Image: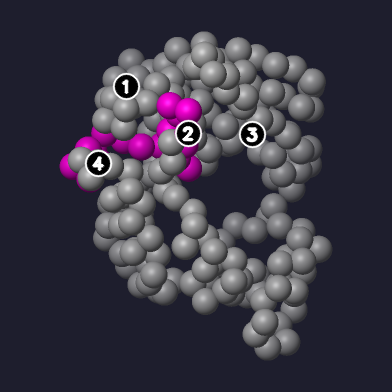
């Protein structure tokens, strides 16, 4: 795992809640891996409560993006996808590395960069198809870092790219940011470093 963003004090703080670390260093990679495993207290919480796809106020939130190739999984609604992801994550790490499910593959909602990096002439059609499948008007993703540390949008604001390298351990500078959604369906990106707000069209 890439734990560059995790400071030793941060790891120590969550390690203090793990009852059976068996004397491991609280700042070690092994310790953090253990905490996020299916046996660790934090890993159990992630697997029990977190969702791969979530909708709030007509906005779809997904780590990397939802491609329309997953439409055959969506007739059962987002709950069916989330339930399948939860089932997949009951496996141990070695089994997960061998898992062939497209949900965990390069085009899946945790790893794809197609919508963030592909040419708008083609990906905006895919964005709209995915939005229509879920019944929402906007999709917000992370995963693909924005080099300038700002929230960006594509496809007339229908796709929001929200990975702003918020941790200073990637570039040496933190880029705190947020997106505010309003009841009328509009949204604004908030750049806390520069104290700026930008409408997401």
The residue identified by callout 2 is 56
Read off the magenta span.
56-73
Judged by depth in the image, the label closer to the viewer, 3 or 2, is: 2
Please give the name of the residue rendered at 57% of the width and 19% of the height, measured from the top-left corner: 182
| Crowd band around label 1 with a 10 angstrom C-alpha radius: few (<14), some (14–19), many (20+) | many
Mark 2 vs mark 1, CA separation in Å: 17 Å
Label 3: which secondary element: loop
Distance between mark 4 and mark 1 Cα atoms? 15 Å
- Disc 2 versus disc 4: distance between alpha carbons? 17 Å
Residue located 44% across and 50% down the image: 51
Distance in Å between CA atoms under marks 3 and 2: 21 Å
Residue carrying label 1: 128
Is residue 118 something that shows in the picture? no
Residue beneath label 4, please? 74
In this orientation, which residue lies closer to the viewer: 44 or 195? Answer: 44
Q: Are marks 2 and 1 in contact (CB under 8 Å)?
A: no
Question: In this orientation, does residue 188 appear?
Answer: yes
Mark 1 or mark 4, which is nearer the start of the sequence? Answer: 4
Above or below residue 34? Residue 172 is: above
Outermost residue, front direction?
183
Quick one: label 3 or label 2, which is nearer the N terminus? Answer: 2
Query: Which of label 4 and label 1 is nearer to you?
Result: 4
Query: Which of the two discs, 1 and 3, labels the residue nearer the N terminus?
Result: 1
Q: Residues within 10 Å of mark 4 (few under 14, many from 20)?
A: some
Residue drawn at point x = 47 percent, y = 62 percent: 48
Q: Per the image, is 69 magenta?
A: yes
How many C-alpha atoms fall within 10 Å of the one at disc 3: few (<14), some, or many (≥20)?
Answer: many
Residue corresponding to mark 3: 164
Local packing at callout 2 (Cα closer than 10 Å; few below 14, some 14-19, many 20+) is few
Q: Are marks 4 and 3 in contact (CB under 8 Å)?
A: no
Quadrant in which the N terminus appears: bottom right
Q: Is residue 124 a member of the stretch shown in magenta?
A: no
């Amino acid at each position: 795992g890439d734990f560059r963003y995790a400071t030793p004090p941060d790891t120590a703080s969550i390690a203090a809640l793990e009852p059976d670390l068996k004397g491991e260093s609280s700042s070690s990679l092994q310790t953090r891996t253990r905490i996020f495993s299916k046996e660790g207290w934090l890993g159990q919480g992630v697997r029990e409560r977190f969702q791969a796809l979530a909708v709030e106020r007509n906005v779809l939130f997904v780590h990397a993006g939802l491609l329309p190739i997953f439409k055959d999984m969506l007739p059962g609604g987002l709950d069916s996808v989330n339930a399948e992801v939860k089932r997949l994550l009951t496996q141990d790490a070695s089994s997960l590395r061998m898992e062939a499910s497209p949900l965990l593959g390069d085009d899946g909602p945790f790893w794809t960069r197609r919508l963030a990096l592909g040419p708008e002439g083609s990906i905006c059609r895919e964005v709209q198809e995915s939005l229509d499948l879920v019944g929402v008007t906007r999709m917000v993703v992370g995963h693909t870092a924005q080099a300038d540390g700002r929230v960006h949008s594509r496809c007339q604001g229908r796709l929001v790219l929200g990975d702003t390298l918020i941790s200073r351990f990637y570039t040496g500078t933190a880029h705190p940011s947020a997106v505010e959604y309003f009841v009328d369906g509009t949204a604004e990106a908030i750049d806390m470093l520069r104290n700026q707000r930008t409408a997401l069209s």
